[in-house]
Image (cartoon, rainbow, N blue to C red):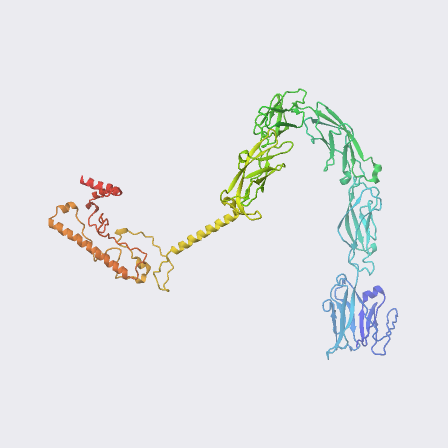
Amino acid sequence: MWTGLLLLLPLWAQQCGLALATLRTIGGLHRAAAVGGVEVAVAGAGPGAGTATATGPGSMELLLRRSKRGWAWNQFYLMEEYMGDGPQYVGKLHSDQDPGDGTIRYQLTGDGAGDTFTIDPRSGDIHATKRLDREEHSVYTLRARAVSNRTGRPLEDWTNFTIKIHDINDNAPTFTKSVYMASVPEMSDVGTSVMTVTATDADDISYGNSARVVYSILEGQPYFSVEPNTGIIRTALQDMNRENREHYQVVIQAKDMAGQMGGLSGTATVSITLSDVNNNPPRFPQGVYQFSIPESAQPGSVIGVLQVRDNDVGRNAEMDYKITSEEGRDVFRIATDKDTQDGVLSLNRQVDYESKRMYTLRVQVENRYLDPRFRSLGPFHDTALVKVAVTDENEPPVFQRSSYQMEVQESAPVGTIIGSVSAMDPDHIRSPVKYSVDRHTDMDHVFNVYPGNGSVYLQKPLDREEASWHNISIRAEEFNNPNQISRVPVNIKVLDVNDNPPTFATLYETFVCENAKAGQRIQMISATDPDEPIGGQRFSFRLAPEATVKANFTVRDNNDNTAMVLTLRSGYSRIQHSRYLVPVVISDGGSPVQSSTNTLTVRVCSCDRDGNMKLCNAEALALPAGLSTGALVAILLCVCILLMLVVLFAALRHQRKKEPLIMSKEDVRDNVVSYNDEGGGEEDTQAFDIGTLRNPEALDDSKLRRDIMPDALYPPLPRRPPPSSLAGAPAAGGAGGGAGVLCDNSDMRDFIAQRLAENDTDPTAPPYDSLATYAYEGSGSVAHSLSSVESAASDGDHDYNYLSDWGPRFKKLANMYGTEDSDKDS
């Protein structure tokens, strides 16, 4: 069981002059504390021990009575920011079972144990190894016990205790901002609140005055003051005027220790601006303003600007202007410039130098928003005189009207005068005026005007149905100054004349049933007329006189601009007469009366009992039962696609499938070898056997070339001498030559037969669709053989004169060779 705990707090004991000693009994426990350098011992080793005596300079005797398990550990205090050289002594743990020979070991755990706080395991002394800051960590909770070094068993159980860091004044007050911005209306009463500043102190507010802050003003007097305890800044001077001074810098100090000497302090700057109030009336800097304006100025033109002074700003400096005099109130107007608040004088309607040359106006300006607190400083308005002089200018002619409207009959002849315009020079010299039509508004030159008197006349015929209105512009310019031009719009309405006959309102497609009865209505017709009579259209319908004889149909007028077409007999035959043409005469009610004959086509159709059409002729069927354009296009596209498929299928079927030269499945060559060498023709003695290309393995060196005659077996025949040399040879020689030619032909036939047999039995021969050409022409040709294979002599040995007897097809050859022979003969 615990028998004692000694806690020494020299510094705290000197400041407070007393010692706190409380017990918490878990077994037997006592602790000793040093009070003013004197040890205080609390003993309670056995069950009967219940008192303790303390001795010291003050002869203070402390009597403690023990209540079992009624003791509680109190908080232990330690000063922060220890400035000593070594570790700071906290206290001492001691057990009554400790004989003092080192057989007891003390242990410490908890907040900062081993790092911030250490314990001597033999003596139980506790020290703080670091400088402690209450603002970082104010309370530490620790646990301690005593363990026997011999047995390793704890002699005392774990006991909790706390160490509270005692505060000192080591933190100065700090404001929430280093610079504050505030504003207060000018002319405010003394004591008007401006704003509140707040400073905080990190020290312990519950201990002493370390955190008790007091505010004071260092700069800004005598204009402002601050309340010491609340930090409220108030005005301290009456009627501070913004126009005199607008900005103030106030420095506020916050000091702890209730403002006593030795306290720490902090400062903040408060920038205070006096906001504006409407305490200054507007004033004109001068009493009279003079402006001038030319008489040619258009409405809206700015004449001048009236500047006004007002020391207020913003909303309090907004002003309104008005013209208070009767003169010029409707001629001029004045408005406020939103940016500068100046008065802008402008022209409301055009002025005339010849009518009035000078205007005198009285203009008043006043504040838009007034503050009733400062009405005594008024009046908040001012007036000034404004004189406006009108200057003379050379003006263009002025028409008597701003626009003209004229009417003309569409049947009016060319040259008819429609109306007239009139303009006059407004200047005092009264220059003559000439007129013309602005051709940009009359591109077709339909109208014209007489230059001298302004009479507008017709220059081309009119048609109201094409254009019922014509809008042109007439120009008037001075004779002496053509640059002075004015224009006036002239609107000409073309009046209608009944000059168009009525026609059918639409294209009617009418049919009559074969089983129709007499008097049956087959069509309702109406008419249209581009004319527009004053009383409206009135049409009448009747059957043409030439159609009344043996008529099959009749027309009944409904007297409401419509008519009915009726049958006059029963039964119609589509086979005998497939359609009828019914002429209808339509007349209007105009003056003069216009009429026209319109033909109605009636088709005969087969109908059911209800009168619904079932079958007509080819033309009639195409209309009710015809396909739409989209359907016809779709059908045509389908037909074209089918035709393309048929052609493609036929082309694929006619394409022959070539039989491969190499039948073995293992020997497949996909590469195509291209040789770009061109053969030498009949004289090429180095021609290549194509069979070798197709199957190189089938090459037989013993086989001879098939495209030329072998030189080894068949030596070249001697060339035949020219006819001239043959003529001089003996007769016997001639006979021998004929036999040689016969021998040559038989050898060639044998050679061809041999090669033909080789191709028939050769498996490497070209495929069946290849053509083998041999330079031999069979006998029986009228032209004999033209091949050079059989020729034994040169070209000069032949006589080509017989080519002239073969007809016009061989004329070119006859000219080429026959001429040469003739030259040689000559």
Residue 423 left/right relative to 331: left
Q: From the top left corner, tell me how far across and down residue 90 is, in percent.
A: 78, 68
For residue 129, what is the image quadrant? bottom right
723 in relation to 456, above or below? below
Q: Nearer the viewer, residue 512 or 31?
A: 512
Q: Report the number of discs.
A: 0
Q: Residue at x 19, y 46 (%)?
A: 797
Q: Nearer the viewer, residue 318 or 31?
A: 318
For residue 824, what is the image quadrant? top left
Residue 655 left/right relative to 724: right
Q: Residue at x 27, y 43 (%)?
A: 809
Q: Nearer the viewer, residue 391 or 436?
A: 436
For residue 663, what is the image quadrant? bottom left
Q: Hey, which residue is sitting farthest bottom in the picture?
A: 151
Location of the C terminus by quadrant is top left
476 in relation to 711, above or below? above
Q: Is residue 500 visible?
A: no
Q: From the top left corner, tell me how far across and down residue 469 is, in percent.
A: 61, 31
Residue 671 left/right relative to 223: left
Q: Is residue 602 visible?
A: yes
Q: From the top left corner, tell me how far across and down residue 722 is, in percent.
A: 17, 46
Q: Nearer the viewer, residue 156 or 520?
A: 520
Location of the N terminus by quadrant is bottom right
428 in relation to 129, above or below? above
Residue 728 left/right relative to 393: left
